[in-house]
């Protein structure tokens, strides 16, 4: 087979390959042999999708046709998938326009969801995602073309292409509020100019790959079709706030090799696209607990959720690891303020919204250094996170920080943080003692003007958060209350990340046995019985930006 | 021994010198034991074993083998409550065994032809069988799925033991007399060991089930005197999981 890459790929797609020193095209970009496609078309009822990447054809067939397909030359295997059940042609969603009048608490949450990633640093460096192309795969982007939060995107023609892979047309603005909320966490803007995400000037490819009310394997085929489409159209980053779990797979199959979407995501990374995926909302589901797919992919940047109140893992965010690999890789706020169809804004929960916050972050980081390959960027985003090199299976490396890219220009270097604690080995114990100079509460200098209100995160049970891609807005009394009431709240939220002590116990291969986060109330903060440790084990502790390891010989 | 005491005292001194207090003083905000969290379960809808409760109701359908035993359809049926155990062999094949309580009620139509169990006509009349039943089934699953029950077809065989049988009738009120309600228990003319076959078509929690009784309703001399009651029940089951 031959492929004219210059003709097939958009200029942006070609440029992406050139920047990352990838070939203009490889064998996985070649089209499926037309005679093979014709043979399958002749034997079956309908060919639904032809995948270049997997050299595969998806079709509808009877058992007799399947038997005949197996006999065709060039057919290596026939994998049976669920029949395509046709969803209703159009299903109007209940009108939830969101709040038009934002409380001060809402505005503060909006500011903090990006500030927690260091938005100010990106802003001062002029990094807004300009020149980056982000593909978003979701259930639909209802009302994006009319919502004031996206006015700048529409006016500047930043939405370069749309495609509905469920219905096979180009309209994506007619149904599905989830994609609207996700897009706003990358590029939405409040009426007062506050950015809801970090990349308001990026370009977008919007793809509908999900049905509203069904979970079918065919959605994975739509995801694959979308990723090939995004590649061809020059996507640099894919945000996929979707995940497939127990209705299709077992937790032990979350290994990055089993599901079609995980394999497709891995291929996307090989073609120079950063795939950012929500870790999942099953952290409090005892039967699942772990990340979904494609977040399980080794080269997929899985994003977990943080509680804006505590800056700790939010209950519903799925835990790692996945087949022994660190997941989630990083974390961002799991409760956000997002644009809602109808022109308003809503508080909403889910790792679906952590993911686009990090996708926007990645766009700015890549804008800062376009020479980075996708896996270099992947590694540096992890390195920029506030806990790095400490990690655990709830937070990954923590929340990425813009200052890493702005101040260090993304350069790795030796750990320069001031030591904040010491390991003290005693008879049968290993103690961690905080140094006196790190045991002081930092003095906070008041700005001339500050928010005089507190944000109150929803009291809604985190356990009610639906699966990734199916989150619903949160209705809270705090959100509905007038600003004056919130003034009286006696427990203001921390404006910055509190100084917790994180520690984990890892084996020689880096696999965690256990991990913990402690509130620090005394200098002698931790003691571990040495009998708990096995040869080769590593105790790693993180406190105030400083990480130190203790290895047992 | 003395050296050990000195070491202990020294250790204690260092301990106090460092100001170390019991770890309970620290507030643990998050704790995870990875091995515990990632233990593979063997139980679940599509795991090696799955057990759950279920509730079912199946109306009696069809006609008696002859005149004299017409039923009130819609009211005659079998209510079941039981526990289902499924053992997966492959993704498409599983074996299962149920244990349940079943209450089968035949509401008898009161007409001129009636002969079961007597020719006397009452205001209301029914035969009730309370049973303990066991059922074995082979499950054929369709389609690929994760840890979900999915869509399936069960081929089943069942048998039971009648815990108790009752003939209830209510005589109409007559002048000066109240209604009389009579229940006769331990009906010797009814079989105590019913059995049969059936099939179940299900998806997730919900299933449609049809059962055919192979055994006769009546035993002994009654078997010849009475027509056989309808053998089919067709109804719905709802899994509780």
Image (tube, rainbow, N blue to C red):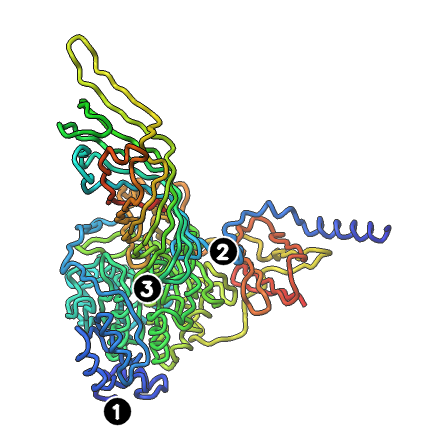
Tell which of A435 and B4 is nearer to you: B4
Tell me the quadrant of the picture where the N terminus of chain A can be found: bottom left
Tell which of A233 and A29 is nearer to you: A29
Q: Helix or strand or loop: what does disc 2 sit on?
A: helix
**Residue at 20% from the left image edge and 30% from the top image edge:** B108
Q: Helix or strand or loop: what does disc 1 sit on?
A: loop
Q: Chain of mark 2?
A: B
- Residue A261 disc label: none
Task: Locate residue B57: give its quadrant.
Answer: top left
Q: Chain of mark 3?
A: B
In the rendered image, residue A264, in percent from the top left (x then y), is placed at 33, 74
Q: Residues within 10 Å of mark 2 (few under 14, many from 20)?
A: some
Residue B52 position (above or below residue A536):
above
Tell me the quadrant of the picture where the C terminus of chain A can be found: bottom right
- Residue B144 disc label: 3
Q: Which residue is mark 2?
A: B37
């Amino acid at each position: 087979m031959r492929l004219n890459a210059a003709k097939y790929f958009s200029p942006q797609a070609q440029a992406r390959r050139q920047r990352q020193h990838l070939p203009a095209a490889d064998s996985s970009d070649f089209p499926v042999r037309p005679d093979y496609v014709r043979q399958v078309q002749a034997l079956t009822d309908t060919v639904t999708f032809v995948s270049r990447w997997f050299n595969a054809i998806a079709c509808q067939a009877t058992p007799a046709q399947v038997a005949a397909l197996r006999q065709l030359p060039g057919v290596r295997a026939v994998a049976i998938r669920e029949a395509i059940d046709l969803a209703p042609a159009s299903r109007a969603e209940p009108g939830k326009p969101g709040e038009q009048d934002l409380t001060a608490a809402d505005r503060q949450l909006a500011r903090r969801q990006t500030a927690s990633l260091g938005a100010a640093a990106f802003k001062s460096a002029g990094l807004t995602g300009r020149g980056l192309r982000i593909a978003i795969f979701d259930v639909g982007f209802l009302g994006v073309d009319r919502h004031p939060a996206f006015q700048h995107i529409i006016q500047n023609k930043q939405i370069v292409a749309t495609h509905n892979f469920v219905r096979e047309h180009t309209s994506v603005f007619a149904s599905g509020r989830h994609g609207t909320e996700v897009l706003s966490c990358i590029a939405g803007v409040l009426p007062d100019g506050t950015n809801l995400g970090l990349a308001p000037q990026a370009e977008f490819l919007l793809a509908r790959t999900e049905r509203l009310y069904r979970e079918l394997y065919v959605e994975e085929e739509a995801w694959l079709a979308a990723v090939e489409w995004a590649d061809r159209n020059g996507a640099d980053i894919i945000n996929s706030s979707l995940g497939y779990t127990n209705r299709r797979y077992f937790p032990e199959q979350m290994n990055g090799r089993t599901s079609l979407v995980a394999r497709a995501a891995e291929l996307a990374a090989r073609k120079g696209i950063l795939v950012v995926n929500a870790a999942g909302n099953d952290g409090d589901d005892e039967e699942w607990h772990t990340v979904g797919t494609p977040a399980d992919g080794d080269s997929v940047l899985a994003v977990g959720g943080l509680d804006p109140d505590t800056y700790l893992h939010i209950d519903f965010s799925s835990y790692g690891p996945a087949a022994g690999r660190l997941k989630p890789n990083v974390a961002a706020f799991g409760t956000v303020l997002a644009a809602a169809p109808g022109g308003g804004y809503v508080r909403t929960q889910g790792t679906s919204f952590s993911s686009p916050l990090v996708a926007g972050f990645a766009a700015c980081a890549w804008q800062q250094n376009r020479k980075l390959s996708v896996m270099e960027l992947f590694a540096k985003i992890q390195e920029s996170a506030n806990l790095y090199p400490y990690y655990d299976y709830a937070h990954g490396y923590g929340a990425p920080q813009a200052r890493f890219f702005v101040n260090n220009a993304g350069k790795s270097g030796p750990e320069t943080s001031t030591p904040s604690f010491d390991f003290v080995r005693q008879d049968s114990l290993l103690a961690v003692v905080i140094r006196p100079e790190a045991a002081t509460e930092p003095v906070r200098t008041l700005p001339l003007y500050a928010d005089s209100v507190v944000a109150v995160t929803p009291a809604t049970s985190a356990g009610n958060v639906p699966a990734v891609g199916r989150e619903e807005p949160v209705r809270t009394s705090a959100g509905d209350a007038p600003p004056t009431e919130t003034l009286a709240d006696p427990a203001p939220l921390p404006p910055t990340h509190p100084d917790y002590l994180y520690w984990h116990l890892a084996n020689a291969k880096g696999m965690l046995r256990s991990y913990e986060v402690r509130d620090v109330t005394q200098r002698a903060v931790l003691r571990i019985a040495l009998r708990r440790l096995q040869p080769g084990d590593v105790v790693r502790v993180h406190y105030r930006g400083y990480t130190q390891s203790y290895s047992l010989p | 021994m003395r050296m050990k005491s000195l070491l202990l005292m020294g250790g204690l001194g260092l301990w106090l010198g460092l100001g170390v207090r019991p770890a309970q003083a620290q507030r643990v905000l998050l704790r995870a034991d990875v091995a515990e969290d990632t233990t593979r379960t063997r139980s679940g809808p599509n795991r090696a074993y799955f057990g759950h409760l279920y509730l079912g109701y199946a109306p009696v359908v069809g006609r008696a083998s002859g005149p004299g035993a017409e039923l009130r359809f819609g009211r005659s049926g079998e209510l079941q409550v039981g526990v289902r155990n499924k053992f997966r062999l492959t993704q498409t094949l599983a074996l299962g065994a149920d244990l349940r309580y079943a209450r089968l009620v035949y509401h008898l139509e009161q007409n001129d032809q009636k002969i079961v169990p007597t020719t006397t006509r009452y205001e209301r009349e029914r035969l009730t069988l309370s049973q303990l039943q066991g059922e074995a089934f082979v499950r054929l699953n369709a389609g690929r799925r994760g840890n979900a029950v999915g869509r399936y077809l069960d081929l089943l065989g069942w048998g039971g033991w009648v815990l108790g049988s009752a003939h209830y009738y209510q005589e109409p009120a007559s002048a000066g007399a109240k209604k009389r309600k009579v229940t006769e228990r331990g009906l010797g003319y009814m079989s105590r060991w019913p059995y049969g076959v059936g099939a179940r078509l299900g998806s997730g929690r919900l299933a449609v089930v049809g059962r055919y009784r192979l055994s006769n309703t009546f035993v002994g001399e009654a078997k010849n005197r009475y027509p056989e009651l309808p053998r089919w029940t067709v109804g719905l089951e709802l899994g509780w999981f």
